[in-house]
Image: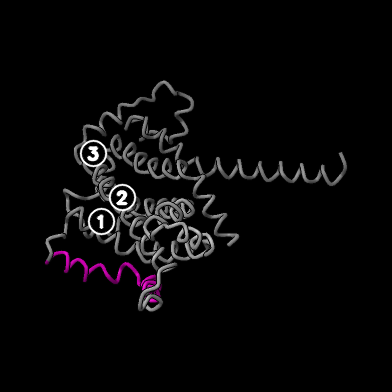
Amino acid sequence: MNLSALRRGLGNSLVQAVLVVVGLLWLTPLAGLFVSSLRSAQDTATGGWWTAISSPGRLSFDNYTSLLGNAGMTRAFWNTVLISVPTTVLVVVIAALAGYAFAWLEFPGRDALFLLVVALLVVPVQIGLLPVAKLFGQLGLFGTIPGVVLFHVSYGLPFAIFLLRNYFAEIPREMLEAARMDGGNEWRIFTRLVLPVGRPALASLAIFQFLWVWNDMLVALLFADSSSQPLTVELQSQIRQFGSNIDVLAPGAFLSLIVPVAVFFAFQRHFVQGVMAGSVK
Protein backbone atom coordinates (compact mmCIF):
# COMPACT_ATOMS: atom_id res chain seq x y z
CA MET A 1 0.00 0.00 0.00
CA ASN A 2 1.48 3.32 -1.03
CA LEU A 3 1.46 6.47 1.06
CA SER A 4 -1.42 8.18 -0.81
CA ALA A 5 -3.67 5.14 -0.36
CA LEU A 6 -2.82 5.04 3.33
CA ARG A 7 -3.71 8.72 3.70
CA ARG A 8 -7.02 8.19 1.91
CA GLY A 9 -7.81 5.25 4.17
CA LEU A 10 -6.99 7.20 7.31
CA GLY A 11 -9.01 10.16 6.05
CA ASN A 12 -12.06 8.00 5.36
CA SER A 13 -11.76 6.34 8.75
CA LEU A 14 -11.53 9.71 10.47
CA VAL A 15 -14.59 11.01 8.65
CA GLN A 16 -16.56 7.88 9.55
CA ALA A 17 -15.50 8.16 13.19
CA VAL A 18 -16.59 11.80 13.33
CA LEU A 19 -19.94 10.94 11.73
CA VAL A 20 -20.49 8.14 14.24
CA VAL A 21 -19.77 10.51 17.14
CA VAL A 22 -22.09 13.16 15.70
CA GLY A 23 -24.81 10.55 15.20
CA LEU A 24 -24.49 9.32 18.78
CA LEU A 25 -24.65 12.88 20.12
CA TRP A 26 -27.72 13.56 17.98
CA LEU A 27 -29.46 10.41 19.26
CA THR A 28 -28.55 10.96 22.92
CA PRO A 29 -31.52 13.27 23.73
CA LEU A 30 -33.88 10.80 22.02
CA ALA A 31 -32.44 7.90 24.01
CA GLY A 32 -32.63 9.93 27.23
CA LEU A 33 -36.26 10.82 26.60
CA PHE A 34 -37.10 7.17 25.89
CA VAL A 35 -35.43 6.02 29.11
CA SER A 36 -37.23 8.76 31.04
CA SER A 37 -40.53 7.59 29.59
CA LEU A 38 -39.89 4.14 31.10
CA ARG A 39 -39.11 5.41 34.62
CA SER A 40 -41.54 6.04 37.42
CA ALA A 41 -42.28 9.56 38.61
CA GLN A 42 -40.40 8.84 41.85
CA ASP A 43 -37.26 7.67 40.03
CA THR A 44 -37.38 10.69 37.73
CA ALA A 45 -37.60 13.03 40.70
CA THR A 46 -34.60 11.47 42.46
CA GLY A 47 -32.07 11.36 39.60
CA GLY A 48 -31.29 11.85 35.91
CA TRP A 49 -32.21 9.34 33.25
CA TRP A 50 -28.63 8.04 33.04
CA THR A 51 -28.95 6.60 36.56
CA ALA A 52 -31.31 3.98 35.10
CA ILE A 53 -28.26 2.23 33.62
CA SER A 54 -27.38 0.90 37.07
CA SER A 55 -30.91 -0.47 37.67
CA PRO A 56 -32.52 -1.39 34.33
CA GLY A 57 -34.96 -3.71 36.10
CA ARG A 58 -36.90 -0.68 37.36
CA LEU A 59 -37.84 0.34 33.82
CA SER A 60 -41.33 -0.56 32.61
CA PHE A 61 -43.98 0.41 30.09
CA ASP A 62 -46.49 1.40 32.77
CA ASN A 63 -46.20 5.04 31.72
CA TYR A 64 -47.40 4.16 28.22
CA THR A 65 -50.38 2.40 29.76
CA SER A 66 -51.13 5.63 31.63
CA LEU A 67 -50.68 7.55 28.38
CA LEU A 68 -53.23 5.39 26.59
CA GLY A 69 -55.61 6.00 29.46
CA ASN A 70 -55.21 9.78 29.22
CA ALA A 71 -58.08 10.96 27.02
CA GLY A 72 -56.50 14.35 26.35
CA MET A 73 -53.20 12.94 25.10
CA THR A 74 -54.73 10.26 22.89
CA ARG A 75 -57.18 12.74 21.38
CA ALA A 76 -54.35 15.20 20.75
CA PHE A 77 -52.28 12.51 19.03
CA TRP A 78 -55.05 11.63 16.60
CA ASN A 79 -55.75 15.32 16.04
CA THR A 80 -52.10 15.73 15.07
CA VAL A 81 -52.39 12.87 12.59
CA LEU A 82 -55.63 14.31 11.16
CA ILE A 83 -53.89 17.66 10.70
CA SER A 84 -50.46 16.56 9.45
CA VAL A 85 -51.38 13.82 6.96
CA PRO A 86 -54.12 15.66 4.98
CA THR A 87 -52.03 18.85 4.95
CA THR A 88 -49.00 17.02 3.56
CA VAL A 89 -51.04 15.19 0.91
CA LEU A 90 -52.88 18.33 -0.22
CA VAL A 91 -49.74 20.44 -0.40
CA VAL A 92 -47.81 17.84 -2.41
CA VAL A 93 -50.69 17.13 -4.83
CA ILE A 94 -51.65 20.76 -5.46
CA ALA A 95 -48.03 21.91 -5.69
CA ALA A 96 -47.20 19.11 -8.15
CA LEU A 97 -50.08 20.12 -10.43
CA ALA A 98 -49.24 23.82 -10.19
CA GLY A 99 -45.50 23.19 -10.58
CA TYR A 100 -46.03 21.25 -13.79
CA ALA A 101 -48.37 23.94 -15.12
CA PHE A 102 -45.89 26.74 -14.39
CA ALA A 103 -43.01 24.75 -15.86
CA TRP A 104 -44.46 23.34 -19.10
CA LEU A 105 -47.92 24.72 -19.88
CA GLU A 106 -48.46 27.94 -21.76
CA PHE A 107 -51.30 30.14 -20.50
CA PRO A 108 -51.88 33.91 -20.22
CA GLY A 109 -50.26 35.54 -17.21
CA ARG A 110 -48.17 32.51 -16.30
CA ASP A 111 -44.97 34.42 -15.48
CA ALA A 112 -46.80 37.15 -13.56
CA LEU A 113 -48.72 34.59 -11.53
CA PHE A 114 -45.54 32.68 -10.73
CA LEU A 115 -43.88 35.92 -9.58
CA LEU A 116 -46.85 36.42 -7.26
CA VAL A 117 -46.29 32.94 -5.83
CA VAL A 118 -42.61 33.74 -5.28
CA ALA A 119 -43.55 37.04 -3.61
CA LEU A 120 -45.75 35.15 -1.13
CA LEU A 121 -42.63 33.37 0.13
CA VAL A 122 -41.53 36.51 1.97
CA VAL A 123 -44.84 36.98 3.79
CA PRO A 124 -44.36 35.91 7.45
CA VAL A 125 -46.93 33.57 8.93
CA GLN A 126 -47.45 35.94 11.86
CA ILE A 127 -48.86 38.65 9.58
CA GLY A 128 -51.78 36.49 8.49
CA LEU A 129 -52.73 35.02 11.84
CA LEU A 130 -55.26 37.61 13.02
CA PRO A 131 -56.89 38.42 9.62
CA VAL A 132 -57.27 34.73 8.78
CA ALA A 133 -58.58 34.00 12.29
CA LYS A 134 -61.26 36.64 11.79
CA LEU A 135 -62.13 35.21 8.36
CA PHE A 136 -62.31 31.67 9.70
CA GLY A 137 -64.58 32.87 12.49
CA GLN A 138 -67.01 34.25 9.91
CA LEU A 139 -66.85 31.01 7.91
CA GLY A 140 -67.27 28.76 10.94
CA LEU A 141 -63.81 27.20 10.54
CA PHE A 142 -62.16 28.73 13.60
CA GLY A 143 -61.31 26.15 16.26
CA THR A 144 -61.71 23.19 13.89
CA ILE A 145 -59.29 20.72 12.36
CA PRO A 146 -60.27 21.67 8.76
CA GLY A 147 -59.45 25.28 9.63
CA VAL A 148 -55.97 24.35 10.86
CA VAL A 149 -55.40 22.19 7.77
CA LEU A 150 -56.54 24.97 5.44
CA PHE A 151 -54.20 27.47 7.06
CA HIS A 152 -51.21 25.13 6.78
CA VAL A 153 -52.02 24.29 3.17
CA SER A 154 -52.34 27.93 2.13
CA TYR A 155 -49.03 28.92 3.73
CA GLY A 156 -47.20 25.80 2.60
CA LEU A 157 -48.12 26.04 -1.07
CA PRO A 158 -45.90 28.99 -2.17
CA PHE A 159 -42.65 27.27 -1.22
CA ALA A 160 -43.92 23.90 -2.46
CA ILE A 161 -44.92 25.31 -5.87
CA PHE A 162 -41.63 27.18 -6.18
CA LEU A 163 -39.64 24.04 -5.36
CA LEU A 164 -41.47 21.67 -7.69
CA ARG A 165 -41.72 24.14 -10.56
CA ASN A 166 -37.96 24.58 -10.58
CA TYR A 167 -37.42 20.82 -10.35
CA PHE A 168 -39.90 20.00 -13.13
CA ALA A 169 -38.41 22.71 -15.35
CA GLU A 170 -35.13 20.75 -15.41
CA ILE A 171 -36.78 17.78 -17.14
CA PRO A 172 -35.44 17.63 -20.74
CA ARG A 173 -37.91 19.11 -23.20
CA GLU A 174 -37.11 16.34 -25.68
CA MET A 175 -38.51 13.79 -23.24
CA LEU A 176 -41.85 15.58 -23.05
CA GLU A 177 -42.00 16.19 -26.79
CA ALA A 178 -41.38 12.48 -27.44
CA ALA A 179 -44.25 11.61 -25.10
CA ARG A 180 -46.55 14.03 -26.94
CA MET A 181 -45.56 12.59 -30.32
CA ASP A 182 -46.50 9.14 -28.99
CA GLY A 183 -50.01 10.43 -28.37
CA GLY A 184 -49.81 11.21 -24.68
CA ASN A 185 -52.01 14.01 -23.37
CA GLU A 186 -50.92 16.39 -20.63
CA TRP A 187 -52.50 14.37 -17.82
CA ARG A 188 -50.88 11.16 -19.01
CA ILE A 189 -47.50 12.88 -19.34
CA PHE A 190 -47.86 14.33 -15.85
CA THR A 191 -48.81 11.06 -14.16
CA ARG A 192 -46.66 8.62 -16.15
CA LEU A 193 -43.55 10.72 -16.78
CA VAL A 194 -43.24 13.84 -14.64
CA LEU A 195 -44.30 12.33 -11.31
CA PRO A 196 -41.92 9.33 -11.49
CA VAL A 197 -39.04 11.58 -12.52
CA GLY A 198 -39.89 14.06 -9.75
CA ARG A 199 -40.29 11.44 -7.02
CA PRO A 200 -37.15 12.57 -5.08
CA ALA A 201 -38.38 16.17 -4.99
CA LEU A 202 -41.88 15.09 -4.03
CA ALA A 203 -40.53 12.93 -1.20
CA SER A 204 -38.31 15.75 0.07
CA LEU A 205 -41.23 18.18 0.02
CA ALA A 206 -43.46 15.68 1.83
CA ILE A 207 -40.86 15.21 4.58
CA PHE A 208 -40.36 18.94 5.11
CA GLN A 209 -44.09 19.67 5.10
CA PHE A 210 -44.95 16.81 7.45
CA LEU A 211 -42.23 17.73 9.95
CA TRP A 212 -43.20 21.40 9.91
CA VAL A 213 -46.90 20.72 10.51
CA TRP A 214 -46.32 17.94 13.06
CA ASN A 215 -44.05 20.14 15.18
CA ASP A 216 -46.08 23.34 14.78
CA MET A 217 -47.54 24.94 17.87
CA LEU A 218 -48.09 28.60 16.91
CA VAL A 219 -50.86 28.01 14.36
CA ALA A 220 -52.49 25.26 16.41
CA LEU A 221 -52.37 27.37 19.56
CA LEU A 222 -54.44 30.06 17.84
CA PHE A 223 -56.69 28.15 15.43
CA ALA A 224 -57.45 24.94 17.37
CA ASP A 225 -59.79 24.71 20.33
CA SER A 226 -59.62 22.18 23.17
CA SER A 227 -61.27 19.43 21.09
CA SER A 228 -59.03 19.85 18.04
CA GLN A 229 -55.67 20.82 19.52
CA PRO A 230 -52.66 18.71 18.45
CA LEU A 231 -50.02 17.03 20.55
CA THR A 232 -47.72 20.05 20.78
CA VAL A 233 -50.42 22.19 22.41
CA GLU A 234 -51.51 19.36 24.71
CA LEU A 235 -47.92 18.80 25.86
CA GLN A 236 -47.53 22.51 26.50
CA SER A 237 -50.63 22.48 28.70
CA GLN A 238 -49.44 19.32 30.48
CA ILE A 239 -46.11 20.96 31.34
CA ARG A 240 -47.97 23.31 33.66
CA GLN A 241 -48.70 20.28 35.85
CA PHE A 242 -45.20 18.83 35.47
CA GLY A 243 -44.91 17.73 39.08
CA SER A 244 -48.04 15.57 39.00
CA ASN A 245 -48.09 14.07 35.51
CA ILE A 246 -44.52 13.28 34.52
CA ASP A 247 -45.62 9.68 33.93
CA VAL A 248 -47.78 10.95 31.04
CA LEU A 249 -45.64 13.86 29.89
CA ALA A 250 -42.47 11.84 29.23
CA PRO A 251 -44.01 9.13 27.00
CA GLY A 252 -46.15 11.76 25.26
CA ALA A 253 -43.08 13.82 24.43
CA PHE A 254 -41.26 10.72 23.16
CA LEU A 255 -44.24 9.80 21.00
CA SER A 256 -44.31 13.32 19.59
CA LEU A 257 -40.61 13.04 18.74
CA ILE A 258 -40.35 9.48 17.45
CA VAL A 259 -43.04 9.81 14.76
CA PRO A 260 -41.26 12.51 12.68
CA VAL A 261 -37.93 10.73 13.22
CA ALA A 262 -39.46 7.51 11.89
CA VAL A 263 -40.94 9.34 8.90
CA PHE A 264 -37.57 10.90 8.09
CA PHE A 265 -35.70 7.59 8.21
CA ALA A 266 -38.41 5.86 6.19
CA PHE A 267 -38.03 8.38 3.35
CA GLN A 268 -34.37 9.30 3.79
CA ARG A 269 -33.32 7.50 0.59
CA HIS A 270 -35.67 9.62 -1.50
CA PHE A 271 -34.68 12.71 0.48
CA VAL A 272 -30.97 12.18 -0.28
CA GLN A 273 -31.78 11.59 -3.95
CA GLY A 274 -33.68 14.87 -4.07
CA VAL A 275 -30.86 16.80 -2.42
CA MET A 276 -28.23 15.25 -4.71
CA ALA A 277 -30.34 15.89 -7.79
CA GLY A 278 -30.81 19.51 -6.81
CA SER A 279 -27.07 19.93 -6.28
CA VAL A 280 -26.13 18.90 -9.80
CA LYS A 281 -28.86 20.62 -11.78
Range shown magenta: 114-138
**Which badge, 3 or 2, comes first in the chain's sequence?**
3
Residue at (16% x, 48% y) in the render: 227
Q: Is residue 133 magenta?
A: yes
**Which badge, 1 or 2, comes first in the chain's sequence?**
2
Which residue is the site of mark 2? 84
Q: Is residue 167 magenta?
A: no
Q: CA distance from mark 3 to mark 2?
A: 15 Å
In this view, the residue in front, 49 or 165, is 165
Which residue is the site of mark 3? 74
Give the class, few, some or many, for how many residues have Cα within 10 Å of label 2's Cα (few <14, many ≥20).
Answer: many
- Three-letter amino acid code of the residue under disc 3: Thr
Q: Main secondary structure of the magenta part?
A: helix
Would you say 229 lies left or right of 35 here? left
Which residue is the site of mark 1? 149
In this view, the residue in front, 201 or 12, is 201
On residue 83, the disc is: none
Q: CA distance from mark 1 to mark 2?
A: 8 Å
- The x and y percentages for residue 204 are 46, 53
Taking 21 as reference, is 175 above or below it?
below
Indicate the quadrant containing the N terminus: top left, top right, bottom left or bottom right: top right
Residue at (87% x, 44% y) in the render: 3
Q: Secondary structure at mark 2?
A: helix
Q: Say which of marks 3 and 2 sits in front.
A: 2
- Three-letter amino acid code of the residue under disc 2: Ser
- The x and y percentages for residue 196 are 46, 50
Q: CA distance from mark 1 to mark 3?
A: 19 Å
Give the class, few, some or many, for how many residues have Cα within 10 Å of label 1's Cα (few <14, many ≥20).
Answer: many
Q: Secondary structure at mark 1?
A: helix
Quadrant of the rendered image containing residue 247: top left
Residue at (21% x, 36% y) in the render: 70
